[in-house]
Amino acid sequence: MRRHRPRLRHRRRRPSCPPPILADRAYIGAGSWVTTPTRRLPHQDLTMAQRTINRALSAARAPVERGVARLKSWPIFRRARCSPNRMTAIAAVVLTLERQS
């Protein structure tokens, strides 16, 4: 007689810390979980390390900013009246088409 083995369901492991959220200077003060560039204080210059960090944050955000700008140029996203889940799939298709052209 064979014993039935229950299926092991794979659980998604939640990370111990949330992924970093990169934002621009408009979000300074939004919370400790939002990574923003360092603001220059009046009559003081940023250190070389602070400038390097600001450049790295800008470089990491740039592809996302370009992707959002491309999506906004497609009329389907201006008049969309469907589920946000469906819009995610449509956005993936649009970005794939943009990349191939």
Image (tube, helix red, strand yellow):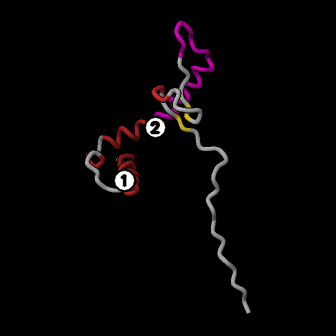
- For the N terminus, the quadrant is bottom right
Q: Residues within 10 Å of mark 2 (few under 14, many from 20)?
A: few
Mark 1 secondary-structure assignment: helix
For label 1, the residue is 87
Residue 23 drawn at (x, y percent): 50, 32
Is residue 3 rendered to the left or right of residue 31?
right
Circle 1 residues within 10 Å: few <14, some 14–19, many ≥20: some
Q: In this view, does 50 lie to the left or right of 94?
A: right
Nearer to us: label 2 or label 1: 1
Residue 4 higher or lower than 37, as above or below: below
In the rendering, at what x and y percent does residue 97 appear? 35, 50
| Magenta region includes residue 5 | no
| In-front residue for pair 3/94 | 3
Spot occupied by residue 61 in the image (x, y as percentages of width and height): 49, 34
* Disc 2 residue type (three-letter): Pro
Q: What element carries label 2?
A: helix
Outermost residue toward the top in this view: 43
Rendered position, 11 above or below 91: below
The answer to whether marks 2 and 1 mark residues whose Cβ atoms lie closer than 8 Å is: no
Vertical comparison of 51 with 71: above or below? above
Q: Residue furthest bottom?
A: 1
Secondary structure mostly seen in the magenta stretch = helix
Residue kind at label 1, given as amino acid type: Met
Point out residue 93 in the picture as x, y percentages from the top left corner.
Answer: 37, 54
Give the residue number, with chain letter if any, for mark 2: 63
In the rendered image, residue 45 lying in the magenta stretch gets the answer yes
User: What residue is shown at x 59% (from left), y 23% (from top)?
Assistant: 52
Residue pictured at 61% horizontal, 59% vertical? 12
Range drawn in magenta: 40-63
Q: Which residue is drawn at 60% across and 20% down?
A: 50
